[in-house]
């Protein structure tokens, strides 16, 4: 499943329109502690978080994540969008909360470890 | 001007913090700090500076210097210490913090009373809002707000698993203009450096994070300064004019 498929099926908003959504997603991780994401997320995971600070982009690059989804209708900080565009990191958004969005992703075959 | 070594504990809660013991009254804090041989303390309650003036007043004439301060919770749930000049008018700063703190009523069932007091330990009121919540201020906004009111900004207990800039944001954002990082009482600065890497360019300090009287002064940082005030602390943290933080 690609980011594009998921964005269409879950009505995700793209905050980084310049970054292509053709990347494959192999799993998912949900956490708001970036230290935890650094420790536990896996390559090609889609990451669900409330955090909007530019550091999320650095963590996504560090862990080679497929992309980030901001939950609860959160909007990224302007610097976060800027950094994400520069680093080619996809930042998406959902009106849903973490629990509901993770459930729907799981239903579409995106699993955690 | 002659430089001397002063012992500082700049992270102390009072009975106003929802996690601070009722025994942390202004007189008790001052008495305990003096008994512990401290020269300089700071009053740093969660998201409020409201009890600081009472502690400053209680310390008048004792030789103990007291800085007003705050332990601010940012939107990322990072704790940032703000330390201010003893003479600063912090009402505008506090108003800005409260404007950014969701007004959730304090439920006494789950938290301790948030007790406002005067310099003679008389109760003057209770803070009605939950002081422990996260403000809407990002770490950058919080540091900017503290600096805008002439204060110093210190990232709290960076080695802890919660409410630390490292736990919440993975690492210290390189463009965040902190004045220092605080290592919790659990680790020495060297142990923290071994675990987290160097905190450069920020100086590392350690304080007690006292919530009860017996914890005051249990962990301190020595400063080589000309006197116990914010200007000298600022120079010590920046390593200016011979002022410095003694490695602990």
Image (tube, coloured by chain):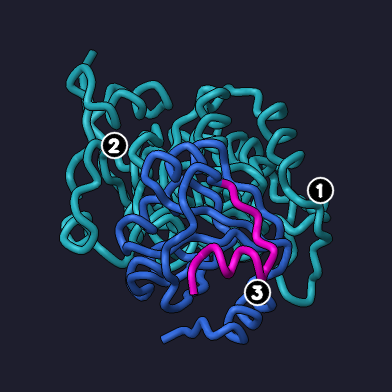
- Percent x, y for residue B212? 52, 64
Asked if the stretch drawn in magenta spans residue A62, the answer is no
Q: Quadrant of residue B157?
A: bottom left
Q: Secondary structure at mark 1?
A: strand
Kindly identify the residue that appears in the image at 44 percent across and 72 percent down.
A25
Q: Secondary structure at mark 2?
A: strand
Quadrant including the N terminus of chain B: top left
Q: Which mark is residue A101?
A: 3
Kindly identify the residue that appears in the image at 35 percent across and 74 percent down.
A42
Q: Which mark is residue B6?
A: 2
Q: Nearer the viewer, mark 3 or mark 2?
A: 3
**Which chain is home to disc 2?**
B
Asked whether residue B45 is in view, the answer is no
Q: Nearer the viewer, residue A56 or B178?
A: A56
Kindly identify the residue that appears in the image at 71 percent across and 57 percent down.
A73
**Which chain is home to disc 1?**
B
Q: Which residue is mark 1?
A: B124
Chain letter for the part of the structure drawn in blue = A
The part of the chain drawn in magenta is A1-15
């Amino acid at each position: 499943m690609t980011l594009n498929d998921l964005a269409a099926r879950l009505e995700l908003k793209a905050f980084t329109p310049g970054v292509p959504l053709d990347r494959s997603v192999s799993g998912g991780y949900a956490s708001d502690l970036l230290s935890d994401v650094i420790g536990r997320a896996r390559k090609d995971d889609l990451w669900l978080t409330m955090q909007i600070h530019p550091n999320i982009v650095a963590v996504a690059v560090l862990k080679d994540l497929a992309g980030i989804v901001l939950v609860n209708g959160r909007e990224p900080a302007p610097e976060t969008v800027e950094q994400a565009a520069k680093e080619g990191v996809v930042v998406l958004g959902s009106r849903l909360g973490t629990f509901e969005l993770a459930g729907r992703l799981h239903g579409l075959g995106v699993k955690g470890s | 001007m002659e430089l001397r070594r002063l012992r500082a504990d700049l992270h102390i809660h009072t009975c106003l913090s929802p996690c601070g013991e009722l025994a942390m009254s202004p007189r008790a804090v001052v008495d305990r700090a003096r008994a512990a041989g401290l020269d300089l303390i700071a009053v740093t309650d969660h998201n409020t500076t409201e009890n600081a003036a009472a502690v400053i007043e209680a310390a008048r004439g004792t030789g103990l210097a007291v800085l007003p301060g705050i332990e601010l919770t940012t939107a990322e749930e990072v704790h940032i210490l703000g330390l201010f000049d003893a003479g600063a008018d912090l009402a505008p700063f506090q108003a800005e913090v409260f404007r950014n703190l969701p007004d959730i009523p304090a439920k006494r069932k789950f938290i301790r009373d948030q007790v406002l007091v005067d310099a003679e330990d008389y109760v003057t009121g209770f803070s009605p809002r939950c002081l422990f919540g996260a403000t809407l201020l990002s770490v950058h906004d919080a540091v900017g707000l503290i600096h805008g009111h002439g204060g110093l900004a210190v990232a709290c207990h960076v080695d802890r698993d919660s409410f630390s800039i490292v736990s919440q944001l993975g690492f210290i954002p390189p463009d965040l203009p902190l004045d220092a990082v605080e290592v919790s009482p659990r680790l020495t600065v060297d142990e923290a450096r071994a675990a987290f890497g160097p905190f450069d360019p920020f100086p590392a300090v350690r304080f007690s994070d006292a919530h009860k009287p017996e914890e005051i002064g249990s962990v301190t940082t020595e400063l080589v300064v000309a006197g116990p005030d914010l200007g000298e602390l600022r120079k010590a943290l920046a390593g200016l004019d011979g002022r410095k933080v003694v490695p602990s």
